[in-house]
Amino acid sequence: MRYLTSVRYIDAVARIGSIRGAAEALAITSTALNRRILAIEDELGVPIFERLPRGVRLNSAGEILIHYIRHQLSDLERVRSQIADLSGVRRGHVAIACSQALLPYFLPEQIAAYRSEHPQVTFGVHLRDRADAEAALVDHAADLAIVFEPVRLADFHTLLRVPQPVCAVVGERHPLAGRDILRLGECLSYPIALPTAHYGVRHLLEVAVQGSALRLEPTVESDSFEFLRHAVLAESVVTFQIPIGLPDPDGQGGTCRIPVDPRDVPTGVLYMGQLKGRVLPVAAARFAAQISSALADRYEVS
């Protein structure tokens, strides 16, 4: 809507941190964008950006304003999707912040299924692990967050909890392949490939070895689970993942998943949620319902 043009401009400058960079993204001149900002600052009676040698940064007044702006833009998206529903046309945009484990299999399948029914709904899927997922909800950069072992849940309204045991992943010719369950000590007797420290799987493994004689000494370390899954095909290493991040057990492409004994490594929890106190747009609310149903069909949920 045209009357929201100025607030969208401010939001873009705040996100990018540069008037020139935001102007390029918005396809207007930086002079015109700067005039808009100066006009709003003049109307408010205070500056909202600190001018820095390289870019701009919101000041205290700007932080208050951007919080209002993002609520307004979020509410407008909800109203637009409700109006589209009245006409029988399913429109809207769903923004998702999620852990890396959701990216290769689960979310592509779910989004494709949803869009087969509502092809005019668009999606934004953004990798945000543990600490960053809740921040994306607070900033209204995401409607939904689906995150494994989040760091904090202060502004997070939980819609669903899904237990996810840690699994060892090995090549099908690895000596551990074919086992029904593994002790952590057995896994650590081979070279291991681990995710980096800010991921939930690594956090659970770190918790597991505390106070024990076991040590996590990775041969390979990466922030890409896709890389780690392929590393076990290239050499005889053991990596770890949760079930939702792995292919179907019947088609694992040369790898085997084996649960790690929960006496050794605690079962983690995948959370799906939204910002506390927010009413979701129709498209996001219906996608959340679909996700809840799909997870309930596959796993025990609470």
Image: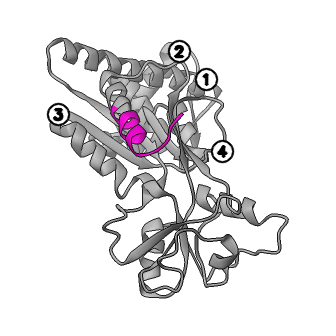
CB of mark 1 within 8 Å of CB of mark 2?
Answer: yes
Reply yes or no: does residue 4 show up in magenta. no
Vertical order, 180 against 204 (above or below)? below
Q: CA distance from mark 2 to mark 3?
A: 45 Å
Marking on residue 151: 4
Q: CA distance from mark 2 to mark 4?
A: 37 Å
Mark toward the start of the polypeptide (1 vs 2): 2
Q: CA distance from mark 4 to mark 1?
A: 29 Å
Q: Position of residue 297 (x, y in %)?
A: 38, 40
Mark 1 — residue?
61
Q: CA distance from mark 1 to mark 2?
A: 9 Å
Of the two numbered discs 3 and 1 in the rendering, the one whose residue sits closer to the viewer = 3
Q: Position of residue 35 (x, y in %)?
A: 39, 28
CB of mark 2 within 8 Å of CB of mark 3?
Answer: no
Residues in magenta, as a range: 290-302
Q: What secondary structure is found at the residue carrying circle 1?
A: helix
Quarter occupied by residue 83: top left
Mark toward the start of the polypeptide (3 vs 4): 3
Type of amino acid at the residue the image marks with label 2: Leu
Q: Nearer the viewer, residue 136 or 32?
A: 136
Marking on residue 117: 3
